[in-house]
Image (tube, rainbow, N blue to C red):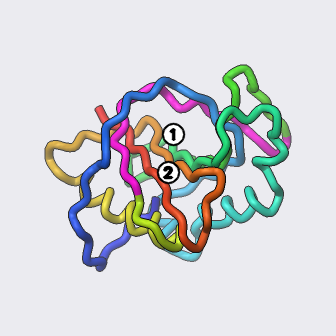
């Protein structure tokens, strides 16, 4: 979700628009800002490291509804200028409202989403480039972001060195 500047960006448009019903994610959460993510104080990378090193997704086992993982941005305080929460997790059955010392759940609200598909490549780099382009796209006068919840979806067999992700931006 990092905002980048000084990058020569190609104009980006959503691949598709999608109406999605609400769904539940379970995982680990941090609170951050775009400013923090552009500094040494960023939390998103550390959250992904924790998710994988502690095998959080695997621990949720039977509760998983869809394989693959998500990073979900929600509880925006001031749209893109304030704090927001991020969860790295998996999609679980709605009735799996488990809360314990390691995981939390969040319900992603039903919404219309502009869906962007990253190029293929080293996943961290392609996702960061896509977000930089999405920030530029969202500044257009006819774009009205909802800031309810935005998320990235990574398929179950994603290759970190040559991967591709989908980024869903909630719109009004």
Q: Position of residue 49 (x, y in %)?
A: 71, 65
| Residue found 26% across the figure and 71% down from its top | 9
Magenta: main secondary structure equals strand
| Residue found 67% across the figure and 23% down from its top | 94
Mark 1 → mark 2, Cα distance in angstroms = 8 Å
Q: Position of residue 119 (x, y in %)?
A: 40, 65
Q: In the drawing, does residue 101 fall left or right of residue 66?
A: right
Q: Position of residue 159 (x, y in %)?
A: 61, 66
Q: In the drawing, does residue 1 fall left or right of residue 43?
A: left
Q: Position of residue 62 (x, y in %)?
A: 82, 33
* Numbered range of the magenta stretch: 101-117
Mark 1 vs 2: CB contact within 8 A: yes
Q: Secondary structure at mark 2?
A: loop
Q: Is residue 106 magenta?
A: yes
Q: State which quarter of the image contains the C terminus.
A: top left
Query: What residue is disc 1 on?
Result: 75
124 above or below 92? below
Which label is found at residue 40? none
Q: Secondary structure at mark 1?
A: loop
Tally the numbered discs: 2
Residue 143: quarter of image? top left
Which residue is at the front of the view, 133 or 123?
123
Query: What residue is disc 2 on?
Result: 83
Residue 158: quarter of image? bottom right
């Amino acid at each position: 979700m990092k905002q980048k500047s000084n990058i020569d960006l190609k104009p980006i448009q959503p691949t598709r628009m999608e109406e999605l019903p609400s769904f539940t994610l379970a995982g680990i959460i941090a609170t951050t800002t775009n400013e923090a993510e552009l500094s040494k104080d960023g939390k998103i990378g550390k959250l992904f490291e924790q998710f994988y090193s502690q095998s959080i997704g695997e621990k949720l086992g039977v509760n998983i509804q869809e394989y693959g993982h998500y990073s979900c941005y929600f509880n925006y305080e001031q749209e893109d200028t304030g704090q927001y929460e991020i969860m790295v997790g998996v999609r679980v059955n709605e009735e799996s409202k488990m809360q314990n010392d390691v995981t939390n759940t969040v319900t992603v609200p039903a919404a219309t989403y502009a869906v962007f598909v990253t190029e293929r490549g080293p996943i961290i780099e392609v996702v960061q480039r896509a977000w930089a382009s999405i920030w530029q796209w969202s500044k257009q006068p006819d774009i009205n972001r909802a800031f309810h919840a935005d998320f990235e979806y990574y398929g179950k067999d994603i290759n970190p060195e040559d991967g591709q992700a989908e980024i869903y931006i909630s719109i009004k």
